[in-house]
C-alpha cells in the first residue's frame, strides 16, 4: 500500500500509519508546532498542507466538507475507500440512532461464521483482519460522505432524523449521505431502508420497511420469540434479517442472550424497589422518542436536557403531549425546554442539575411509575461524556 497523507491525528489515521509501519505525514488542527512521534510519523499543523506535494490523502471521518484540508485536497479518500480492495464481504450499518446496537447484535450472531465488527463502533478498518470472511461496519454519516469507491454487499439503514446539521449543513444533505452507499451497490446486493426517503437510482435490491411488524413478516421472523422491545426489537429484527437472507437462519436463542450496552435503557431499582432507567446514550431526538415510546405504559418522570446543537425538538414534544409525563430539565437548553413545555402544556420542573432532578423525582413519584434519564442532548455542557452522565445518574439513585 502507498503511504497516504493523513488528515487529523486521531484513532483512524493513527491505525493506518501503524499498519504501514509508521513514517507517515499527518496534518492536524490541534498541532501548533511540527513534531515526530514514537513511530517516526511527522505531525504538522493543518496550515502547512500543500496539495501539490501530496498524491493521496486519507481523512479522519470528523473533518467536515468545508474544512480547508478537505477543500484543498485533490486525491481525497475515506478510510473505507483506502481499504476497499482488501475489504471482504461487508455489511454496513448506519442510521441516526441504534446503529451501534444493531452492529453489536449482528457481530454476535455472525461470530460463529467469522464475522468481525469495526468502523465507527471503535475498531478502525486498519485493525480488522482482512482474511475474515465478513466485515460488519458501523458507518457514520461523516464516513459515508467522504466515501466514493468502497461499497457494501448489504446495507442496513436504521430510521433517520436530522442530526449533525452543524457538519452536514442541511437535513437534505444528511439524508443524502445516509443513502450514498446505494449509488455504488450492484444487482443482487440488498439494502434495508426506512420508507419515505428520497432514494437515489440504484441497482441494489431495496426493501423499504416502516415497522418491526413489517420486518418480521417480510423475513418470516416470530416476534413473540424475541425478548427485546421498542427500538431494540427493531435492531434485533434488522440483525436477524441478515442471517435469514444469507443463511436462512433465525437464531432466537443467540439473539436473546445478547446483552445491551450500559447507558442504553439500562434498568435499575432504588432501595425502595422503584424503577429507574439510565438512557444517557440518548444524545439525540430520535433516541429519546424511542425511549418514551418504550415506557409509555406507565407514568414517566423524564430527565431531559443538555447540548442539542439547535435541533428541532418539536416532534418529541408533540409525542410527549399525548403521554402521561412530567419533565425535569437540566443543562444548556433548559430555557428552550421550558418554553416548549409551556407551549405543549407539559408539566415540568427546572431542575438545572442531574442530582437535583433525581432528588426531586424521588420525592414526587408513586408506585408503578418510571424515572427515565433520556436527555435528547449531548452531555458536554455538564459532563465529560454520556458515560460520565450515566454513571453519575446511577450514583445519585444509589444514594436514595
Image: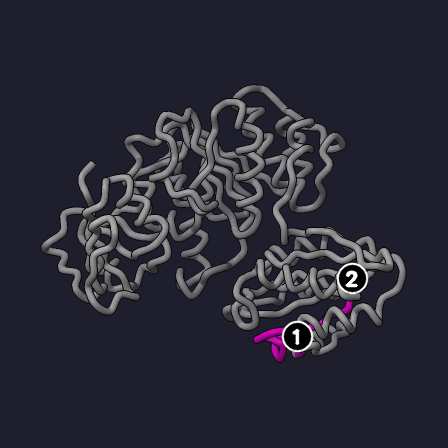
333 inside magenta stretch: yes
Q: What residue is at 72 percent from the left and 53 percent from the top?
A: 293
How many dots with numbers? 2
Residue holding disc 1: 353
* Helix, strand or loop status at disc 1: loop
Q: CA distance from mark 1 to mark 2?
A: 19 Å
Query: Could you tell me residue 264's position as x and y percent?
Result: 64, 51
Colouring scheme, one of rainbow, by chain, secondary structure, one colour: one colour
Residue 27, picture quadrant: bottom left
Image point (52%, 65%), residue name? 384
Q: Which mark is residue 300?
A: 2
Residue 133 place in picture, x, y as percent: 42, 24
Of residues 47 and 390, the one drawn nearer to the viewer in this rendering: 390
Image quadrant holding the N terminus, namely: top left
> Range of the magenta residues?
322-338
- Residue 342 in view: no
Amino acid at each position: 500500500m502507498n503511504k497516504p497523507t493523513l488528515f487529523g491525528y486521531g484513532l483512524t489515521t493513527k491505525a493506518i500509519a501503524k499498519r504501514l509501519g509508521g513514517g507517515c505525514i499527518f496534518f492536524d488542527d490541534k498541532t501548533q508546532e511540527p513534531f515526530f512521534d514514537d513511530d517516526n510519523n511527522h505531525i504538522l499543523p493543518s496550515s502547512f498542507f500543500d496539495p501539490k506535494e501530496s498524491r493521496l490523502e486519507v481523512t479522519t471521518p470528523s473533518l467536515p466538507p468545508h474544512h480547508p484540508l478537505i477543500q484543498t485536497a485533490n486525491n481525497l479518500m475515506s478510510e473505507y475507500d483506502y481499504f476497499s480492495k482488501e475489504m471482504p464481504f461487508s455489511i454496513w450499518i448506519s442510521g441516526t440512532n441504534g446503529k451501534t446496537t444493531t452492529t453489536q447484535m449482528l457481530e454476535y450472531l455472525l461470530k460463529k461464521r467469522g464475522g468481525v465488527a469495526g468502523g465507527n463502533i471503535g475498531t478502525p478498518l486498519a485493525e480488522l483482519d482482512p482474511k475474515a470472511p465478513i466485515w460488519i461496519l458501523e458507518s457514520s454519516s461523516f464516513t459515508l460522505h467522504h466515501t466514493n469507491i468502497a461499497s457494501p454487499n448489504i446495507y442496513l439503514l436504521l430510521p433517520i432524523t436530522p442530526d449533525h446539521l452543524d457538519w452536514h449543513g442541511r437535513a437534505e444533505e444528511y439524508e443524502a449521505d445516509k443513502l450514498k452507499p446505494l449509488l455504488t451497490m450492484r444487482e443482487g446486493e440488498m439494502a434495508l431502508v426506512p420508507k419515505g426517503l428520497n432514494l437515489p437510482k440504484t441497482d441494489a435490491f431495496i426493501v423499504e420497511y416502516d415497522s418491526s411488524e413489517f420486518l418480521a413478516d417480510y423475513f418470516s421472523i416470530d416476534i413473540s420469540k424475541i425478548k427485546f422491545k421498542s427500538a431494540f426489537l427493531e435492531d434485533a429484527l434488522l440483525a436477524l434479517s441478515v442471517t435469514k437472507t444469507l443463511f436462512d437462519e433465525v437464531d432466537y436463542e443467540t439473539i436473546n442472550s445478547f446483552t445491551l450496552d450500559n447507558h442504553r435503557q439500562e434498568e435499575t431499582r432504588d432501595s425502595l424497589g422503584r424503577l429507574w432507567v439510565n438512557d444517557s446514550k440518548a444524545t439525540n431526538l430520535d433516541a429519546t422518542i424511542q425511549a418514551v415510546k418504550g415506557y409509555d405504559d406507565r407514568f414517566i418522570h423524564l430527565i431531559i436536557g443538555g447540548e442539542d446543537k439547535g435541533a428541532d425538538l418539536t416532534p418529541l414534544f408533540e409525542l410527549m403531549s399525548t403521554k402521561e409525563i412530567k419533565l425535569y430539565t437540566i443543562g444548556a437548553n433548559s430555557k428552550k425546554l421550558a418554553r416548549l413545555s409551556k407551549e405543549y402544556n407539559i408539566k415540568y420542573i427546572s431542575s438545572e442539575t442531574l442530582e437535583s432532578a433525581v432528588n426531586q423525582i424521588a420525592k414526587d413519584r408513586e408506585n408503578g411509575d418510571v424515572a427515565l434519564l433520556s436527555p435528547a442532548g449531548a452531555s458536554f455542557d455538564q459532563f465529560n461524556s454520556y458515560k460520565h452522565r450515566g454513571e453519575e445518574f446511577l450514583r445519585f439513585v444509589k444514594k436514595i
